[in-house]
Amino acid sequence: MQQYSSLPDHNSQIDVRPKPLTTIEQLRAKLWLESSLNQLQGRLNDCLLSACKTVPQARAAETKILQTVVNEISSAVNNSNLAVTDCAVGIALFEPQATVATVCYVSSSLSPNSQPLFLELLTTEKKLLLRLQEVIELEDLQQLENQQPPSAWRLADDSGNVMGWLILATAPLNSARDSLIKSLAQLRSKLMARSAKRCTTALVQLRHILSWQQRYQQLSNSNQELERTNQLKNQFLANTSHEIRTPLSSIIGFTHLLLAQGYEPTKERQQEYLNIIQSSGKHLLALINDILDLSKIEANQLEVQWETIDVPMLCSNVFALVKEKAANKGLKLRLKLDPNITTLVADPLRLKQMLLNLLFNALKFTSQGSVGLEVVPKGLFVYFTVWDTGTGISQEDQAQLFEPYFQIAKAVAGGEGTGLGLAVTQKLAQIHGGSVKVESEVNCGSRFTLVLPFKQDEGAGEAGEAGEEKYSLSPLPFTTNSSVDILLVENDLPNAHLMQIYLCKLGYQVTWVKNAAEMWETLPQLDPVVILMDVHLADGNGLKLVQQLRENQQYRAIPVIVQTAMAMKGDRETCLAAGVNDYISKPIDLPLLASLIAKYSKPPTKVDGE
């Protein structure tokens, strides 16, 4: 029987020769390369992980990444059995558009005190040092990049923006094993090239992390600011509610008392109640004016009436307004005026408002002692200093004192006010080209100084040229002239009743209608000398009615005075542009209303010969 062997027929086809030493070296080299890159990547991942925690850590991570790269590469090439010579690694950074780079990072094997290694350019005899703060020209870096094998590798992102250069420095070699040296040089080049790519990737990822953290930080800051604003808003609403309810309680309570059946107070007691009602109403108006003023200022809509002011007289008038409050608390008022100060250019109403805000604050925080006003000139400015012997203000509170709605702790201030007075005062001072300063210590009183220029810049008075005409605020004497007919178009019953009673006592015949339809129905039956027009009516807009009156031949010559709650900048001009003759804002100043009607109800002066 024929037998077959499972072994090949030709033993010569089996390679039984041992593996060449060169193949083993290649495997060792490949293993070394991948192991070094994995080690580097692990270190870079640690850097990126730490960068994700906070913004400061993210900013510091770039330094950590670059230093890690040079240290890991240096460790790989110098601690390997493949290395036959010492090597050093560095990174040179440069700003965009620059022509030179600076060595900012070097490997741990190249300490600042050690001998620097040289980079030799094959195309020239020029030698470059690799050490910290050494400057290398961009042209030299490009030559290092282009020589074979390369000694520099650029760190460029996907957009081609070069962030820096990774540089390899080797000591001069004196060896006959050229082939091995060449092989090791190529291996190092692979390590450097792939390390540069990983370094670039890590830097790009770091930028994304930092960008995300910055956006997160901005969002967090915005949320905190919104939360703070919301808290201020809630505090403001609570304070405003308290401020409104307090005088309203007096108004409603004393009015109810006067209207109660069976209660007949004496005339003196009635006068006392009415004074309380009037005072509470003025307090409400002052609160609304503070809120309105701040809104006007922030919207750049506040009109200023520039005038030459008699400073001593204005200060005396201001003191007369706070005299009663000071007396009620047993406080002394002190006024000291420099005789050299006579006049300055400002808005008298706003200057009085600023001084009253400061004086009322001083009185509020002073329980015993004195409150004073000192006025002195300093160069081109006047210094109005309001001082007190009160509780004083801490440094922490001073930092927020002029912020809208801010109030000092209620335990100190008693919870009064809405926190708008000082904010309005500071903004009004800035509009005047001045400022407000504060000096204070706890339990040592306070000094608020209002600094205003003597004169305003040229053209500063233009804002006030369109202001309301000023009239005497004294009531007109009652007359018996009932031949003057006035048509009152008013949507609000209490306001209509108030004006009708007041004007009738002055001798006018007042016909009241509450909407546009009633106005058109009444006009043919009446020959009014003046029409008082409300802007907001239930069935139309008062300004449009004025325009329709001006288009009607029969009524176009009748003077029209608008009474409205519109009080922002430009509202007066809007009314005048619609064809009205004059404008008065609510709450109605009754003496001013009487003056306006007297002005427009006068018959036209006849020319001689007519």
Image (tube, rainbow, N blue to C red):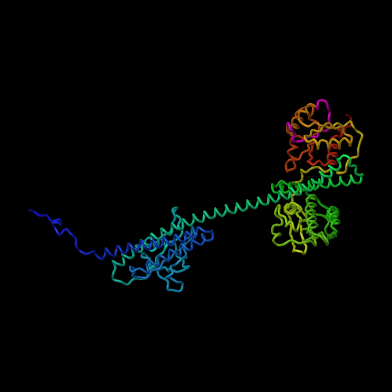
**Residue furthest left as drawn:** 1
In reply to whether residue 526 is colored magenta, the answer given is yes
Which quarter of the figure is the C terminus placed in? top right
Q: Where is residue 390 in the image (x, y as percent from the top left)?
A: 79, 61
User: Which range is magenta?
Assistant: 522-539
Please determine whether, in this image, residue 63 is positioned above or below residue 547.
below
- Can residue 76 be spotted in the picture? yes
> Which picture quadrant has residue 196?
bottom left
Q: Where is residue 566 in the image (x, y as percent from the top left)?
A: 74, 40
Q: How many marks?
A: 0
Q: Where is residue 287 in the image (x, y as percent from the top left)?
A: 76, 48
Q: Nearer the viewer, residue 421 or 97?
A: 421
Q: Nearer the viewer, residue 22 or 147?
A: 22
> Which picture quadrant has residue 179?
bottom left
Please determine whether, in this image, residue 169 is positioned above or below residue 508.
below
- Can residue 451 be spotted in the picture? no
54 relative position to 87: left or right: right
Q: Which residue is drawn at 79% across and 40% down?
A: 584
> Which picture quadrant has residue 502?
top right
In reply to whether residue 434 is colored magenta, the answer given is no
520 relative position to 79: left or right: right
Q: Nearer the viewer, residue 13 or 485?
A: 13
